[in-house]
Amino acid sequence: MSKQTSADSRMIQSIFQLVLVSLLVIGSARWILDELKSNKSRIFQLYGFRQKQAVFVTKEDQIDDSCNVFEGKWVWDNVSYPLYTEKSCPYLVKQTTCQRNGRPDSSYQNWRWQPSSCDLPRFDALKLLDVLRDKRLMFIGDSVQRSTFESMICMVQSVIPDNKKSFHRIPPMKIFKAEEYNVSIEYYWAPFIVESISDHATNHTVHKRLVNLDAIEKHSKSWEGVDVLVFESYVWWMHQPKINATCGDTSKVQEYNVTTAYKIALETWAKWLETKINPVKQRVFFTSMSPTHLWSWEWNPGSDGTCYNELYPIDKPSYWGTGSNQDIMKIVGDVLSRVGDKVTLLNITQLSEYRKDGHTTVYGERRGKLLTKEQRADPKNYGDCIHWCLPGVPDTWNEILYAYLLRSHRNNF
């Protein structure tokens, strides 16, 4: 009887020790997991890295294929917007920092685009970084596209530790890197997409323009192999109704109608796409024209101003100003229809047409310098109704791009 009791006692003691060890292991594991969930944990402080969260694409993240995110209206939202501030983002150039440059109002930062038949997913920087893990995202175009690039890095950079991000200028490129995710967000200066005498990132002529309509190789070698490409080209074409260009023989310069030249250039780009882009591994987007708001009589008949001192969006359904060329829009539609699913059109023109209040006007730069007091007093001649303040309208363009990338990720991109 005593032997049985002794055996039972040893068994109970062994079970107790096993339970105790199990509890210690579980407790330690829970402590480690709790530590890993906190970016302030001693583990992160010691090794200098943050949690890399998994992507969970929920129903709220998914835009249905049938939803047209480009139809809708601007709604006032001073709770969720802006998504960042001028002070929080060190990567903004003086051309877009309207508040810093003296703009007295800030309401242009608080409008949210609301599609009519669906909701855009709330922007999540960590989720985007994980969707783009080990990938390159490149914006190609002019200074409007450069603002879109700056908008994107401002939207993501705040979640990245200072020692885990970098920014480099390597003309004609700017490169932002999020090291933990091996993500590169880049900008490439190519105002006409094809080659031109304006291809130097800083030393380029504005008035004398010469475009090589069938040449793209000098640019495209920097685009090959990039995972996500976002192209844009419009305002540089619209300086005059005609443009000097070459096609075939570079020694023969001719004067082309802008629409004719634009069509040839876009077809050159489309041919490059068809031979160099693998739609299984790469995504290509083309952003439609960014509208200008040069003449206030278009939305306010009888007036004689510009977009200067405009504080509210245009509240006219389907408003379309003369700053957006419908012939160019048709060319874009025709060319993109021929390349099929290799390119996704980001048709931001109509939604941006309403935003006469979002331009830099006299609170930006002119030829690399902030406007003088005298120039600011003459907004009709010196106001900029082409470029946009940041935070502002380009953030919405990036929210739409983000929605498309989430949908692609859901489809195993």
Image: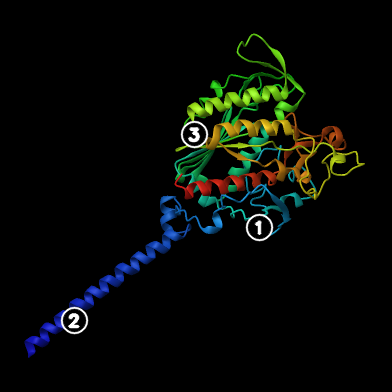
Bin the neighbour count of mark 2 within 10 Å (Cα to Cα): few under 14, some 14-19, many 20 and up.
Answer: few
CA gap between label 3 and label 2 equals 64 Å
Sequence-wise, the earlier of marks 1 and 3 is: 1
Measured as percent of width and height from the top left, residue 360 is found at 76, 40
Horizontal side of 327 relative to 285 (left or right) equals right
Name the kind of residue labelled 2 in the image.
Ile
Q: Which residue is mark 2?
A: 12
Residue 73 visible, this orientation: yes
Q: Nearer the viewer, residue 272 or 200?
A: 272
How many numbered marks are there?
3
Measured as percent of width and height from the top left, residue 293 is found at 79, 39
Name the kind of residue labelled 1 in the image.
Ser
Q: Nearer the viewer, residue 406 or 124?
A: 406
In the image, residue 283 sits, relative to residue 214, either above or below, namely: below
Quadrant of the drawing holding the N terminus? bottom left
CA gap between label 1 and label 3 equals 32 Å
Using the rendered view, name the quadrant where residue 16 is placed.
Answer: bottom left
Q: Which residue is mark 3?
A: 226
In the image, residue 326 sits, relative to residue 259, either above or below, namely: below
Q: Which residue is mark 1?
A: 80
Measured as percent of width and height from the top left, residue 255 is found at 73, 15
Q: Nearer the viewer, mark 1 or mark 2?
A: 1
Q: Nearer the viewer, mark 1 or mark 3?
A: 3
Sequence-wise, the earlier of marks 1 and 2 is: 2
Name the kind of residue labelled 3 in the image.
Val
Q: Nearer the viewer, residue 252 or 388?
A: 252
Q: Which mark is residue 239?
A: none
CA gap between label 1 and label 2 equals 59 Å
In the image, farthest residue toward the bottom: 1
